């Protein structure tokens, strides 16, 4: 099992993102989209990672993005619920459990890439210890 948000978990997510290949790469005009996630935890340091999609294989990287187009911030419980599919991003945003900065409309330009990455991540999520 991979402990949620551990270095090993992030490395497994990175490998899964690479496995998605170039699926859903957007056109030159749309460029690259960088999505940063910050997961806060009252009892431990927060964790940041980012996903880069658009041109070429997706990358999933530990740490903050040098420049994030979209940035999500939430607590560990909410992040885990969203990752497991127990809570939608929309519901988390509407309830204030998840905050977002940036142009969320840009997500629609990389739907195919995000779907491909999500499919590859499902194997990692199945091996995740959420505790």
Image: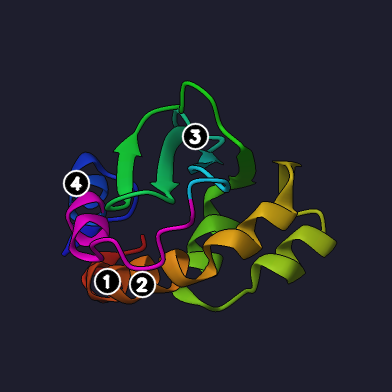
Direction from residue 99 to residue 95 in the image, left or right:
right
**Dots 2 and 1: beta carbons under 8 Å?**
yes
**Dots 4 and 3: beta carbons under 8 Å?**
no
Please determine whether, in this image, residue 85 is positioned above or below residue 67.
below
| Comes first in the chain, label 2 or label 4 | 4
How crowded pointer 3 is (Cα within 10 Å; few <14, some 14-19, many 20+) is rated as: few
Give me the disc on residue 120: 1
In the foreground, 54 or 7:
54
Give me the disc on residue 43: 3
Residue appearing at x 31%, y 38% in the figure: 61
Percent position of residue 100, x then y: 72, 45
Please determine whether, in this image, residue 32 is positioned above or below residue 122.
above
Separation of residues labelled 2 and 4 (CA atoms): 18 Å
- Between disc 4 and disc 3, the foreground one is 4
| Comes first in the chain, label 2 or label 3 | 3
Give me the disc on residue 116: 2
Q: Could you tell me which quadrant the C terminus lies in? A: bottom left
User: To which residue does mark 4 refer?
Assistant: 11
Give me the disc on residue 88: none
SS for callout 1? helix
In the foreground, 2 or 90:
90
- Between disc 3 and disc 1, the foreground one is 1
Separation of residues labelled 3 and 1 (CA atoms): 30 Å
Instruction: Count all numbered tags in the image, as a single digit.
Output: 4
**Dots 2 and 4: beta carbons under 8 Å?**
no
Direction from residue 96 to residue 12 in the image, left or right:
left
Residue appearing at x 30%, y 46% in the figure: 59
Percent position of residue 41, x then y: 53, 38
Residue appearing at x 32%, y 46% in the figure: 60
């Amino acid at each position: 099992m991979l402990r949620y948000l551990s270095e090993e978990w992030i490395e497994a997510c990175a490998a899964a993102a690479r496995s998605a290949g170039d699926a859903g790469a957007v056109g030159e005009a749309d460029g690259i989209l960088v999505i940063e996630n910050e997961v806060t935890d009252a009892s431990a340091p927060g964790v940041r990672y980012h996903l880069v999609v658009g041109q070429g294989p997706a990358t999933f990287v530990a740490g903050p993005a040098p420049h994030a187009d979209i940035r999500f911030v939430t607590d560990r419980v909410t992040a885990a619920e969203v990752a497991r599919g127990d809570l939608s991003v929309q519901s988390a945003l509407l309830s204030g459990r998840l905050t977002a900065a940036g142009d969320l409309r840009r997500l629609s330009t990389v739907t195919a890439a995000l779907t491909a990455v999500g499919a590859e991540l499902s194997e990692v999520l199945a091996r995740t210890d959420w505790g």
